[in-house]
Amino acid sequence: MSRLFKMRPPRNIVIIASALLVVLSYAVPSFGTPDTDADATPDTDTSSTAAPATRTIEPLVPPSILISPSLGISRIVSPPSHSVLLSGTIDVIYRLQTDETEAALPDAVPVTLDSLKLVIDGQVEQWDPIRGAALSKRIRLAPGVHELKIGEETLECVIAMNEEDHDGPENWPVFNSHYISSKPDRCGRCHEMESDEADVFQVGDFSGPEACIECHDMIDFEVAHMHIFQPLEACHTCHAIHGSEQKSLLRAPVRELCEGCHDPDH
């Protein structure tokens, strides 16, 4: 009995090993076998190894834009010409988008982005890596009058310590700027934005009112406006999102804006 008992372990090992070989005979082929799904399209090009896919972002504007001199509309969104700025840190914003009306005018001519150089007080400045709907550059200016030129447009503004004490003419209005973050992707707080592999940000459309209510409380909104939110949810109808000469960044005086929807005689 003792001899038979001693012989059983090797026999058990053989049985277990045989069972493992059977299992592996079914499992091993699946490791190196290509996918044979009937819906899959076989790759017939074996001449070279396919390059890895790269994420690209299509520019939101063409390499050139159409500008009509006869239209007489400035593309400089901020700051406006002949304005008083109460901060020396400003964002120069130049609109790139061309609407269908401007593009259809007979004197509309293509202007390349390379020709839209930013010149401040005679010195060329490089635009920040922001493209798409606009060009942008954050600059810091000392108190005093400054000249900015973009392409064929020229503007003057004055940096002031306060509204009354500045070097510009007395009739220049104060321009109230909307707060903009100092981060490279700062436009993305209010605009649709994507970035490409070169860290160039493509700025798209305004994201309101969702962008507005991220910072502005809904209850405070209805109290301040004495109006429910629903009819006024297109915030940029009444407010200039980059800045305005009116208080509260309004596009026009309050009464004028209200009469756009309400009959003043009722």
Image (cartoon, rainbow, N blue to C red):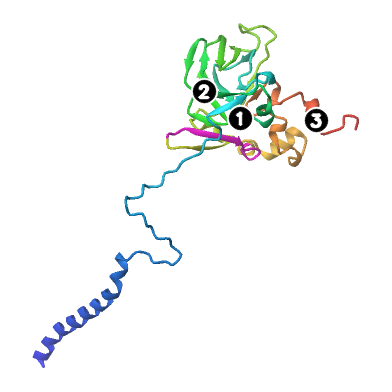
Q: Which mark identifies residue 170?
A: none
Q: Which mark identifies residue 137?
A: 2
Q: Where is residue 219 in the image (x, y as percent from the top left)?
A: 70, 39
Q: Which stretch is magenta? A: 198-211
10 Å crowding of disc 3: few (<14), some (14-19), many (20+): few
Kindly indicate the quadrant of the structure image that contains residue 251: top right
Kindly indicate the quadrant of the structure image that contains residue 11: bottom left
Identify the amino acid type marked 1. Answer: Gln
Q: Is 125 left or right of 46, judged from the image as shown? A: right
In the picture shown, does residue 164 fall above or below 95? above
Q: Nearer the viewer, residue 188 or 165?
A: 188
Q: Nearer the viewer, residue 142 or 61?
A: 61
- The residue carrying mark 1 is 97
Label 1, label 2: how far apart the Cα atoms are: 17 Å
Q: Where is residue 228 in the image (x, y as percent from the top left)?
A: 76, 40
Q: In which quarter of the image is the N terminus?
A: bottom left
Q: Is 78 left or right of 200, judged from the image as shown? A: right
Q: Does the magenta stretch include residue 35?
A: no
Q: Which mark identifies residue 258?
A: 3
Q: Is 21 left or right of 47, judged from the image as shown? A: left
Query: Which is closer to the viewer, label 1 or label 2?
Result: 1
For marks 1 and 2, the one nearer the N-term is: 1
